[in-house]
Amino acid sequence: MCGSCESALRRTRDVIERYGWAVVQVDAVRSRPAWAYTAGLVQHGLPEFVVTGLAPDRAGELLNDTAHGVLCHEESWVPGQQFRLADDTRVEVVAVARPDVHLRTARALFPDHPLHALQLVWSDGRRRWPWSARFDDRRGGQPVLGPRGRRGT
């Protein structure tokens, strides 16, 4: 592992030790939009959370609010469950099919913990989901990293 990678892991580990989790941001590259995920919840037996296609500040806010809720208030989320954000954006929970592929920092920091992840999939401004042909986020897309749950509509 390169020195820069080790330094980033050390900083992330420090944040996790202080707060219980960290948000890892992954920059957009060519056709792949930016995405973000939590790291550290797995050490408490909880799933990590992922969001794709949101601006870094909005993704961080959503992930921090969700992590705080599950870690500090015992909230739980299941695939297919839906909720609304304060701005009326709808969110549906989707199980991430291959979390080891997408959450590399969480896997590197907690190699001995079973890694499960839930994606927070958001609707566009017209309340359409990314699995709709008419979805339009004007940002470059929102990859969905697993199949929809049974409750999804």
Image: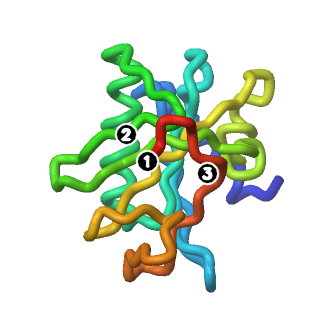
- Seen in the picture, residue 85 relative to 132 is either above or below; the reply is above
Mark 3: which secondary structure?
Answer: helix
Q: Upstream in the sequence, badge 1 or badge 3?
A: 3
Q: Residue at x 46, y 53 (%)?
A: 121
Q: Upstream in the sequence, badge 2 or badge 3?
A: 3
Where residue 82 is drawn, which disc sits there? 2
Give the CA distance from mark 2 to mark 1. Answer: 9 Å
Q: Would you say 138 lies left or right of 41 here?
A: left
Q: Upstream in the sequence, badge 2 or badge 1?
A: 2
Q: Which residue type carries mark 3? A: Ala
Mark 1: which secondary structure?
Answer: loop
Residue marked by disc 3:
8
Q: Quadrant of residue 18?
A: top left
Where residue 47 is drawn, which disc sits there? none
Q: Are marks 2 and 3 in contact (CB under 8 Å)?
A: no
Q: Are marks 2 and 1 in contact (CB under 8 Å)?
A: yes
Q: Which residue type carries mark 2? A: Gln
Q: Quadrant of residue 57?
A: bottom left
Q: Residue at x 48, y 32 (%)?
A: 21
Q: Residue at x 65, y 48 (%)?
A: 147
